[in-house]
Image (spheres, rainbow, N blue to C red):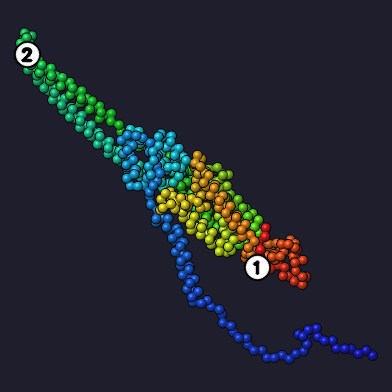
Amino acid sequence: MTTSTPVAPADASAAPHTSAPRTPAARIPAARTRWRVTMMAGLGAAAAVAIVLLAFVWPTVTSSVKDLPVVVVGSGDAASTLHRTLTDDGRFDVRDAATEDDARAALTHREAYAAFVVSGSSLEVLTASAASPVATQLVAQKVATIGQGLQRDAITSQTALARTAAQDGAKAAAAAAVAGTLQRVAAQQFPTPQSHAGPAWAAFSGQLAGAQQQATAAKSAATAAAAAVTAAPKPSVTISDVAPLSSGDPRGTGLGLLGLPLAMGGMIGGLIVALLISGFGRRIAAAGTYALVGGLVLILIMQPWFGLLPGPFLLNWLAMGLGLFATAMTIVGLESLIGRAGIPIGAILTMFVGNPLSSLASPPEFLPWAWGAIGQWFVPGATGNLLRDLSYFPDASTTHGWLVLACWSVAGVLLAVLGRHRNEETVHLEGATEVAGGRTGGVADANSTDRPAAESRPAADDSAAVTPSHGRHVAQV
């Protein structure tokens, strides 16, 4: 006879127990933000809005028409008068050029916005509307004023010549009348040849000859004065555009509006790479891919589609892509070095400093102090003016633009190098990252760079080899 032994429960939960009455859980009050923090958040948001407004309004409010470089070709009183006319209100910085060819070279090399060629009473004005439509409009307004002045001067001169001609004509008529009267007197008093033998005739004949000479001279003077009035040069003013805008952008608004999309595009690319991509090499690759594809898309829109850029396609693509890469890599580098705070710093440098100072819509000389020149050392200004030079001014030097973009790109890469071993927090999409051993998941453990994930932890803790997607990690190449 076999006896059975009772089997103990597998765990405590399987053992019989007595149920105790449940007590209702205590309600935990919802956490609320302190009033101080609440007020500080509101004030901070208001300050941010004010800064944004100032960044975009300040260049417009503080800019003034001044120191616009122009060239004058000519000599004599007309050139001196033109110098005084151009410099009387401080709007133009007048420089001299020896020949018209030198003046044209100054425009095609972007050393001046206009040239005034004086030749006698004619004035030829050379402009480069592609350099700045605003500057060309100001020059046209000044030319209209100069043309009115030339017309007034011509009318004054012609009036003086006509007055002189009228006076000489009156003198000629009076002298002719005197000579005619003396001839009639001679015919009456000295009718025969015998009467010409006496002293009376000798005196009278001298008087008659003098009157005839005066009449002839007065008639010649009157004829010359009339000819001077007829031959007086008429003032002429002609305007020629040596660097016109493309037919697709006759008002030049395309390049002027490029700054904001370029800045926003670079910021978006940098933000995406900084938040979603880990690993130094992969961040560089992501930023480079974004720059190449993004630059291509932007150039395809602006050049073949809308016809806003007439320059060489490949160079324009390279310039646009390098501008996007410089901005994106600056943000990525700052985020790699100092963390998430680097993202707003890069955005401020691009959007609130570089873009307002880019001077893409107006000449940089119009900004106060040296802000216009400083703005050309930021990515938006350098990219926009580089595209302008490539499209409209093939003779102008593009070294500055390429150098600025290269410096910002290299600086961003160097910042990323310095921050490559800093623990950083990244946001990853599920399945977007790799851990050691080729598995996909969240962010790899810090020790997984040296050994497989399966060996880095005991088998019982294998589930901890993949951390949540918002964990902290060491950026890897």
**Where residue 36 is drawn, which disc sits there?**
none
Quadrant placement of the N terminus: bottom right
Q: Nearer the viewer, residue 107 or 341?
A: 341
Give the vertical position of 158 relative to 92 (above or below).
above
Quadrant placement of the C terminus: bottom right
Amino acid type of the residue that numbered disc 1 sits on in the rendered structure: Gly
Ranked by sequence position, the earlier of labels 2 and 1 is 2
Give the vertical position of 177 relative to 270 (above or below).
above
Amino acid type of the residue that numbered disc 2 sits on in the rendered structure: Trp
Q: Residues within 10 Å of mark 1 (few under 14, many from 20)?
A: some
Whether residue 316 is visible here, answered yes or no, is: yes
Q: Which residue is mark 2?
A: 201
Q: How many marks?
A: 2
Assign a secondary structure to mark 1. loop
Q: Which residue is mark 1?
A: 471
Which residue is rendered at x = 53% and y = 49% of the image?
404
Which residue is rendered at x = 62% and y = 57% of the image?
417
Which residue is rendered at x = 78% and y = 87% of the image?
15
What is the C-alpha distance between the residues marked 2 and 1?
133 Å
Task: Indicate the position of residue 392 as horizontal and vertical percent values.
Answer: 49, 42
Task: Indicate the position of residue 222 as horizontal and vertical percent values.
Answer: 20, 26
